[in-house]
Image (tube, rainbow, N blue to C red):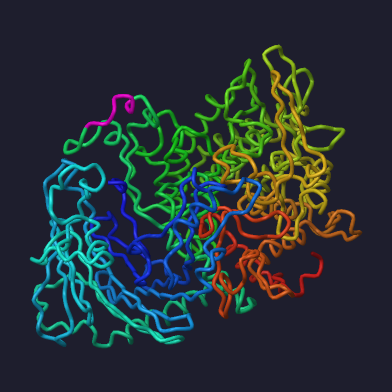
Amino acid sequence: RAFRWSEDGIAGISDIKQRLCFAFAFWNERDKILKERLFGLSGPEGNHGEDVKEVYFYTDNTPTHSYMRMTYRYPQTAFPYDELINKNATRSKIETEFELWHTGALEAGFFDIDIEYAKATPDDLLIRVTAINRGQSQAKLHILPTLWFRNTWRWGHHHDHPSLSQAVYAKTRSEVQVIEATHLELGNYRLYCDGPSELLFTENETNTERLWSFPNASPFVKDAFNEYIVEGNDGAINPSRTGTKAAAHWSLEIAPDKTKTIQLRLRKTAADTTSFQPFTEFNKIINKRIAEADEFFSSIASTNLSPEHRNIHRQSLAGMLWSKQFYHYIVEQWLDGDPGQPQPPAERKKGRNAGWRHLYNERVTSMPDKWEFPWYASWDLAFHCIPLALIDPGFAKEQLDLILREWYQHPNGQVPAYEWNFSDVNPPVLAWGAWRVYKIEQKNTGTADREFLETVFHKLLINFTWWVNRKDSEHNNIFEGGFLGLDNIGVFDRSAVLAGGGYLEQSDATSWMGMFCLNMMRIALELARNNRVYENIATKFFEHFLGIAAAMNNVGDGLGLWDDADEFYYDVLRLPNEQFIRVRVRSLVGLMPLLAVETIEPELLEAMPGFKARLEWYLANRPDLAALVSRWQVPGIGERHLIALTRGHRMKRLLRRMLDPNEFLSDHGVRSLSRFHRENPYMLELNGKVSVIKYEPGESETGIFGGNSNWRGPVWMPINYLLIESLQKFHHYYGDEFRVECPTGSGQFLTLDEIANNLSNRLIAIWLRGKDGRRPFAGTSGDGLLGGGEPARYWFHEYFHGDTGEGLGASHQTGWTGLVAKLIQQQGTRDTIVKRDAFTDL
């Protein structure tokens, strides 16, 4: 029942509509429950929000999922559920989280359970499980590969009822047992199991008697295997060997440092299956898929990369591919309820997401964090598509196109933010994502998909109009986007209505819109190569960009977002009495204007006479506006033109702070809040309430936005990635003669391209073993528990400690942290990648 909209399981896979599902369950004979899914804490239970409390690694995957591999680390003692819940409940927000390795459960011994999937054909899947005893004593392990149908028949929309049953199969070795799956739309599948002790069957039905003391519709319910294996209740499973949920059961005894392997094969059945030998050449087929995966990743990774860089590159991309999930949330059905279920409370129809009735989520989507209840975030998705474009540009384009489709994008033009509030506002980065995916595919394949670019461009035009109409309250080109995905970066909740009225004129919202304008202008110019109509549209976005540049210099009463004294951009609080207050918080908000930058090649400008003429008109007739934008009218290196919000002087002053180790620059990238605020917290008194913000390099110390994502000091990969791209664009214009001190105060002056490379290598070094033998991302958990062994296994966290580089937030997220694959690939191609132990300027 809890999974009305989707299913869940360890190493779980399904068909594209999640009708037939397959995953694993385990039991060590000491756990109090069968381990059927990954355990974690909900938001209120964790001292820093929701969090998975398990150890597992996504180690390999290919774009077609021809080969997939992951490792699940299962303690040999009773899993410490209660200890994890109770210890985290007693910890304050200024304390670290209590993790599985803190309990001692892993020190007492564990199993490393390696799970591999390999396709013989698209409808023929080989499954191999290798369990290794990492303990000191012989230990027992039960493995239950489980096949089930997602329960859609209870909703009342249709009455099709799929079935699972034991199939008679006597043409191969007698120990092979077979589960047959029958589905009206999918057809028939068979799961061949090599030597299990038994097959188990039940129904995928809610145990209403256990939940609500209400009689079960079926005597066999979805928790039957736990009752049978753990509790010894023989009556829990269906003796007729039919149902909608089935499992093969292996009971293994494994000596220390020894392994046991089981094998299965899930295959769409042909007309004649009597002569099929499922395990002939089984390992040969798997090894062939592994060799193909090796060949594929070798083909996309530069030869300059070290083995460890290649390993990080491959595992980060594997995590991206493992984190694809079927996401099923049809808002209208949720609001109105199902015909076959009790009606929801009346208030739901006017509650959360009630304004999104058209939204029909029923697709495979790239997830920010696969452990959490499935959800997407539109701005996360744009970043996901960059590394995905390296290996599967088709899927990357599909994701961007999907979020802008008419059954996703609101009729008013807004793009859905995320499940718990589709109406929240994420930064407008989809245009950037579409342009980058287009260019990555063009570079890697030689093919430019203009049809994709033109399709998303038209939908983005509608979204741009929504931003202008809804998020520019004074129609003055200064935008108020709310928290804009940066959670607690403000001194107060930037999405909340201010007591007594007023609103925040946001440097980051306005900068994002400047970047949006330039992205749209650049796409329009590309489309104008084939259709001159787009020249006019490109001009429209250039004009709008100039308007934003002008507004940033005067939000009211002669006050701009740029502060001449501090030489930094700040939000400005506009009160009802027309009083303006600069919110002097040195955060990423003030660095965002660096992101609004674009260069135009002279060949492109010459090919667009209409666009060029309009630029020259502005230069001649509106010098007041033209002067606000960085040197767009002055050709740079190679006669390129630069269009940017920050002029040379302001750009240098921002970089002076950004590259200062005492402010933004850490050994592991650019911090989200200046370290200046560690000793100098910022306080703002408004309507008798004092709000404070200080440097917090680790987990959030406040409960703003749930307290599980902290933008008050840690390093976040997506913004760092955008800053690196911006530096590369600035260098593209200024060239090698333009140098900036880096780090600030070091006396070392680097080109902007060298600074971009420096930042890239600082980020990559989060996963590299240092001179102390540790990898920063693993923190104090012990490298042996997370990244131990060679080749190492990695986690790609949500964000990273601003001083130590320790991984924080969603621990297995990958998500936008998968951008490290693009950085590694780029640095390897340029031959600028730096070995961790040689990175001397940290």
Q: Residue furthest right?
A: 747
Expressed as whole percent of the image width and height from the top left, the position of residue 131 reads 39, 79
Which of the pair 477/622 is nearer the observer? 477
Q: Residue at x 45, y 70 (%)?
A: 75
Name the side, left or right, on which 158 lies relative to 633: left
Side of 231 where 673 appears, left or right: right
* Nearest the eye: 359 or 521: 359
Across the whole image, how many numbered discs are drawn on residues? 0
The image shows residue 56 at horizontal and vertical percentages of: 47, 67
Residue occupying the point 53% across, 25% down: 470
Q: Is residue 264 shown left or right of residue 587? A: left
Q: Is residue 32 above or below residue 131?
A: above
Task: Locate residue 724: give its quadrant.
Answer: bottom right
Q: Quadrant of residue 215?
A: top left
**Depth check, front residue: 517 or 610:** 517
Position above or below: 45 against 272: above
Q: Residue at x 60, y 62 (%)?
A: 820
Residue 384 appearing in the image: yes
Q: Quadrant of the C terminus?
A: bottom right
Examine the structure image and report whether residue 347 is included in the region drawn in magenta: yes
Q: Which quarter of the figure has residue 196?
A: bottom left
Q: Is residue 602 visible?
A: no
**Highlighted range, magenta:** 343-349
Residue positioned most to the top? 577
Q: Position of residue 447 (x, y in %)?
A: 47, 61
Between residue 654 and residue 260, name the one nearer to us. Answer: 260
Is 513 magenta? The answer is no
Residue 498, image x and y in percent? 62, 21
